[in-house]
Image: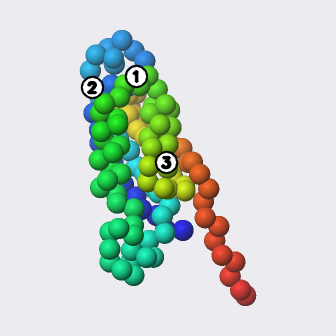
Amino acid sequence: MDIVYIRDLKVDTIIGIYDWEREVRQTVSLDIEMAFDISEAARTDNIEHTLNYKAVAKRLIAFIEGSEFLLVETMAEQAAQIVRDEFGVSWLRLRLSKPGAVRGARDVGVVIERGERAKQPATEA
């Protein structure tokens, strides 16, 4: 299975359950691994045959900047659904973190996997 990824995509948004969090924009960070067969893109050297990570990033930035969430879980679930539905990704792992949310910790957040991972072909002995 090939993986196209985006690491540490930072987006400012309204996120959190406390009153003060509803008043200020906070930065969240996303790491996304997306299953996508890149063999045709590698063969043709044509972006039309791959998953355009810039298009994915721009879509997620627009969505998250324009949204407000109470929970990182909800944001992660909806972001994952956008990537799967709009970009034809069969499987993804998405890590969404909220830096500075807990004193003493660099960040907190969730990691979710959605979809089916491609099965590895059996090798002959």
Binning the other alpha carbons within 10 Å of mark 2 as few (below 14), some (14 to 19) or many (20 upward) gives some
Q: CA distance from mark 3 to mark 2?
A: 27 Å
Which sits earlier in the primary sequence, circle 2 or circle 1? Answer: 1
Which sits earlier in the primary sequence, circle 3 or circle 1? Answer: 1
Binning the other alpha carbons within 10 Å of mark 3 as few (below 14), some (14 to 19) or many (20 upward) gives few
Q: Residue at x 50, y 61 (%)?
A: 35
Specify the label residue 25 is tagged with.
Answer: 2
- Quadrant of res 79: top left
Binning the other alpha carbons within 10 Å of mark 1 as few (below 14), some (14 to 19) or many (20 upward) gives many
Residue that lies at the very extreme toward the bottom in this rendered image:
125
Looking at the picture, how far across and down is residue 42, in whole percent? 38, 78
Specify the label residue 85 is tagged with.
Answer: 3
Looking at the rendered structure, the secondary structure element under dot 3 is helix
What residue would you read off at disc 1?
Answer: 16
When the figure is inspected, residue 31 is found, relative to residue 119, above or below; the finding is: above
What is the three-letter code of the residue carrying label 3? Asp
Instruction: Locate the N terminus and report the quarter of the image it occupies.
Output: bottom right
Specify the label residue 65 is tagged with.
Answer: none
When the figure is inspected, residue 106 is found, relative to residue 23, above or below; the finding is: below
- Quadrant of res 63: top left
Q: Residue at x 47, y 37 (%)?
A: 78
